[in-house]
Image: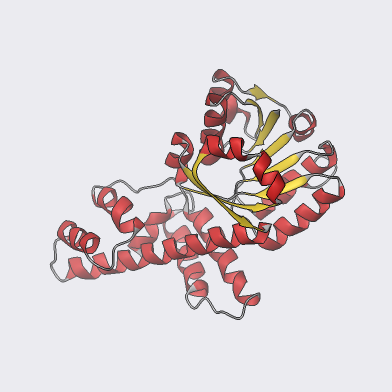
Amino acid sequence: MQIGFIGLGNMGSGMVVNLLKKGFDVSVHDIQPEKAEALIAAGASWRDSIPEVTGDAGVIMTSLPGPKQLEAVMLGDAGVIAHARPGTIWIDTGTNSIEIMEKISALAGERQIESIAAPVSGGAKGAETGTLSMFVGGNQETFDNIKGILSAIGSQIYYVGPLSHAILSKLLINYLCFINTKALGEVLSLGTEAGIDPKQLTNMIQAGSGSSWVAEKLLPSILEGNPGPAFTLNLAHKDACLVNELNQSFKTSLEFSERLCEVLQQACTTYGGDKSFTRMMNL
């Protein structure tokens, strides 16, 4: 079964490399062809257009920045849905709007294309090492059929049922990560202002009840001047605003979601949207 992979950014390129290592036949496409050069050298096949990468694949995988790009790739006369064969499985690994994913999935279903939402967590490093966490939603039988593909790129795979549950799980996890990142920035700033050594404060945070993945994995390198993951402020802002939209769909209120969206917009303006999301700590 050939896999057609669309979107060769920091995440997509790492996933393609691991699929190739596991022996999968992978064809690739991106709006920036130069991103495919190393992948072609590693064994991937280049396709010049979405119809070409779609037409000869049994599985289509997408790794795109957000809902706007996903709609552009999937819909329209030159999109995936128009050119995929009946029985094709589409796996989206991005973090997207529940509404947009369900809309595209419904249109894909009309063409007998199975849809799987599989947003990933673990950053570019996880994509590179094949150790991503994946939150998977869609038809159970389809999920069972693609476990080998998912296992090539992820080490922790959680099947959660409907498409919407996979997307919601990822959005909520990112929400917690961003809130924790901002809170840690405030704590370190106040502690430093008061005269506490930031490295010692970090050690105490890690040893206490306020510890977290961000405190454990990111803070030490940030204090050494490494900005951390390649996950950008633009992407974090997009995800935070998608979380904020959930307040219109559920009775439970996400009390910090609107402010988080504002903070990340400010960080994009102040530092540049292409910088690591950890720069929000400096506001």
Q: Position of residue 71 (x, y in %)?
A: 73, 50
Residue 165 against residue 218 in the figure, above or below: below
Apparent side of residue 216 relative to residue 77 in the rendered image (left or right): left
Q: Residue at x 48, y 49 (%)?
A: 274
Rendered image coloring scheme: secondary structure
**Viewer-closest of 213 and 162:** 162
Q: Position of residue 226 (x, y in %)?
A: 30, 46
Residue 41 against residue 226 in the figure, above or below: above
Q: Position of residue 194 (x, y in %)?
A: 15, 71
Residue 191 against residue 277 in the figure, above or below: below
Q: Residue at x 59, y 62 (%)?
A: 168
Q: Position of residue 198 (x, y in %)?
A: 18, 60
**Viewer-closest of 144 and 129:** 144
Q: Residue at x 76, y 33 (%)?
A: 54
Apparent side of residue 86 relative to residue 216 in the rendered image (left or right): right
The quarter of the picture where residue 144 lies is top right
The quarter of the picture where residue 278 lies is bottom left
The quarter of the picture where the N terminus appears is top right
The quarter of the picture where the C terminus appears is bottom left
Apparent side of residue 73 relative to residue 254 in the rendered image (left or right): right
